[in-house]
Amino acid sequence: MAKFKKKKSEPTVDPNDSKKESADVPEIEKSEPVPDTPSEDPSVNVAEKSEKDRKLNKLFWMRVALAVIAGTAATFLFENIEGEDRRWASIGFMIIIFFGTIIVAKKMNMQLPSSDRKKIVTQAIGSYVFLYLFSWIVSYTLTHLGSTSSVINI
C-alpha cells in the first residue's frame, strides 16, 4: 500500500486564524433518511418466487442426472470409434444433450425477469460438464480395466 505524506502547513501565529478558515467552509447539507424499500420488484410475490426457485432446482437436478447418465452412455455408444474421433464425438454428444435441456427448460415456462433470462443456460452448466466428463472417464476406465496391459502390476 502506498503511504501518503501528510501535508505540512505553516503554523498559525494567532489562535484566532484557524477560526477564520472554518467560517469559509460551507456546511454539509443534512441528508434526508431514505425510506426502507425492498430491493426486489414489489410485483413479484412470494409464491411466484418459490415457484421459480422450484423450477430452477428441478432444472439443476435434471442436468446433474443427465450428465451422469449421458457420460456413462457415451462410453458404450462410441465404443467402435477409435482415437481422437471418440473424444470429439463424446464432447459433441455432451453439447447436444445440454441443448436438449435448454429446450426442456424453456418449455417449463419459468417466469424469469429479463435480468435472469440467462439462468436457463447457466444453471448447473459447470456441474453438468464436470459430472459428464467424470462419469465418462470413470465408466471408460472401469470398462477397460482388464483389457489394457500396464507397466505396473498391482
Image (spheres, grey):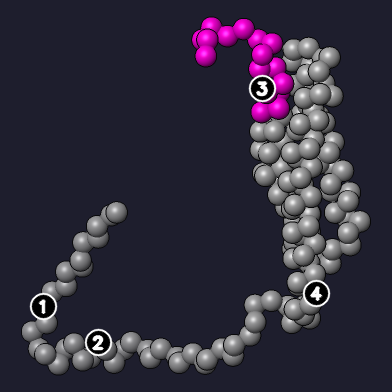
Q: Main secondary structure of the magenta part?
A: loop
Picture coordinates of residue 74 (x, y %)?
A: 79, 28
Query: N-terminal of the two: label 2 or label 1?
Result: 1
Quarter of the image holding residue 66? top right
Q: Which residues are magenta?
A: 138-154
Q: Are marks 3 and 1 in contact (CB under 8 Å)?
A: no
Picture coordinates of residue 96 (x, y %)?
A: 85, 36
Picture coordinates of residue 98 (x, y %)?
A: 81, 41
Who is closer to the viewer here, 14 or 108?
Answer: 108
Report how far apart the C-alphas of labels 3 and 4 lie in the structure: 45 Å
Foreground disc of the pair 3, 4: 3
Q: Secondary structure at mark 4?
A: helix
Query: N-terminal of the two: label 1 or label 4?
Result: 1
Residue at the disc numbered 1:
11
Q: How many other residues sit within 10 Å of disc 2, few (<14), some (14-19) or many (≥20)?
A: few
Query: N-terminal of the two: label 3 or label 4?
Result: 4
Residue visible at 79% across and 50% down in the picture: 62
Report how far apart the C-alphas of labels 4 and 2 lie in the structure: 59 Å
Foreground disc of the pair 3, 1: 3
Report how far apart the C-alphas of labels 2 and 3 lie in the structure: 80 Å
Tell me, yes or no, whether the highlighted magenta stretch contains residue 150. yes
Horizontal side of residue 107 vs 125, given as left or right: right
In the rendered structure, find residue 141 and report the number of the disc placed on it.
3
In the rendered structure, find residue 48 and report the number of the disc placed on it.
4
